[in-house]
Every structure is written in C-alpha cells, then in structure tokens.
C-alpha cells in the first residue's frame, strides 16, 4: 500500500479562505481595511472540480486535513479518516465522492480542506508550483454573520502529468 502523499497547506490558502473578498484582496472579519494576499505558488493549473463538500463545525473543531494527492484507491479510502472522529457525516459524504469516480488512468484526485468561517465560495482553482500545489477559493462572498462556521473540502480531478513529479 502506498502511503498517502500529503502536502503542506499553504498559509495563503488558509488566509484567503478564512476571509472574504475578491481573489486579489482580503477582507478581515475585524472590520479593518482589506489587504493584499500573497500570490499562490506557480501558475494556474488545469483541474476539474469533482465536488465541494461542506463541513459545518459550530462549536466543534474545524478539520485539520492536509491537501493530498490521492493516487490510488487506498489513498481515496484513507482520506475520509481525517474527518471521521469529529465530522462523521462529512467523512461519509467525502468517502462517497471519492468512491464514485471512474478515473482515467492518467489522472489523480486532489483533496484540499479550505476553512471558510462564514464565507461562501463559487469554486476553486488549482495552482501548481515547482514542488507544491495550492487550492484557492474563487468567488468568495464575505458574510458578517452566520449560524455555524464552515470548511469546504474541494476534490479535483487532475492529470498526473500536470503535477510536480515530487508529489
């Protein structure tokens, strides 16, 4: 069994996803003025969005799952385990999504946890650097109030050749 290949979730993704605003600015929830966000690594890469799975964590712990390249069935079966203890419903939904794809042999799935707090997003974009990747939310709408904080797990199908060889 191949180990699940894990990537460090970039600080830029956490900052952008945790705050609202356009892809070029942050809108801090404290009410201060927007600031520029660091650019994600590399260039925008091709990737087809398979699913956005909502994880609500009102009063609970937000999931800490890393961004991961899911190369094979073993990886796809293991990834929902990051959510099983604190978010069993989300773990089940993620497992269902990961079990469904009939992937082309040349593609892999990329899964990324994006904390949103009270914000909503329209989608995500994949950025590919020399040795890393980042999944960045798009169409971010900031909401001042909400009933529960949310995180989204983005699952994308990506050609293996479009990812760094080290992943």
Image (cartoon, rainbow, N blue to C red):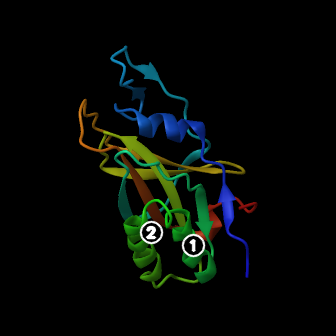
Q: Is residue 164 visible?
A: yes
Q: Circle 2 sits on which residue?
A: 91
x and y, in percent, of residue 141 in the image: 27, 37
Quarter-of-image position of residue 22? top left
Local SS, label 2? helix
Q: Residue at x 41, y 73 (%)?
A: 92
Q: Quadrant of the C terminus?
A: bottom right
Percent coordinates x, y for residue 109 in the rendering = 53, 70
Provide residue 158's location: percent of width, then percent of height.
Answer: 53, 67
Residue name at image x 42 percent, y 82 percent: 100
Q: Earlier in the sequence, mark 2 or mark 1?
A: 2
Q: Residues within 10 Å of mark 1 (few under 14, many from 20)?
A: many
Question: On residue 108, which mark appears?
Answer: 1
SS for callout 1: strand
> How many marks do you count on the picture?
2
Numbered circle sitting on residue 93 = none
> What residue is at 74 percent from the left and 63 percent from the top?
165
The structure residue drawn at horizontal position 37% and vertical position 60%, both measured from the top left corner, is 52
Nearest to the observer: residue 1 or residue 132: 1
Which residue of the protein is positioned furthest toward the top in this rendering?
Answer: 32
Vertical order, 104 against 57 (above or below): below
27 or 134, nearer to the observer: 27
Question: Could you say where residue 59 lies in the image, as x and y percent from the top left?
Answer: 37, 45
Asked if residue 50 can be seen in this view, the reply is: no
**35 left or right, relative to 66:** left
Q: Residues within 10 Å of mark 2 (few under 14, many from 20)?
A: many
In this rendering, the answer to whether 135 lies above or below 2 is above
Give me the C-alpha separation between circle 2 and circle 1.
Answer: 20 Å
Instruction: Describe residue 6's horizontal placement relative to residue 50 as left or right.
Output: right
Q: Quadrant of the N terminus?
A: bottom right
Q: Disc 2 or disc 1, which is closer to the eye?
A: 2
């Amino acid at each position: 069994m191949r180990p699940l290949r894990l990537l460090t979730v970039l600080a830029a993704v956490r900052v952008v996803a945790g705050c609202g605003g356009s892809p070029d600015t942050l809108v801090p929830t404290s009410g201060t003025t927007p600031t520029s966000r660091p650019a994600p690594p590399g260039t925008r890469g091709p990737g087809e969005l398979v699913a956005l799975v909502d994880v609500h964590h009102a009063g609970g712990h937000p999931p800490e799952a890393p961004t991961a390249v899911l190369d094979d069935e073993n990886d796809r079966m293991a990834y929902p385990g990051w959510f099983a203890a604190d978010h069993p419903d989300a773990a089940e939904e993620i497992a269902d999504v990961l079990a469904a794809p009939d992937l082309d042999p040349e593609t892999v799935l990329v899964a990324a946890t994006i904390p949103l707090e009270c914000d909503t997003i329209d989608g995500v974009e994949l950025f590919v650097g020399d040795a890393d990747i980042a999944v960045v939310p798009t169409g971010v709408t900031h909401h001042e109030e909400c009933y529960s904080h949310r995180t989204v797990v983005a699952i994308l199908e990506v050609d293996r050749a479009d990812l760094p060889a080290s992943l």
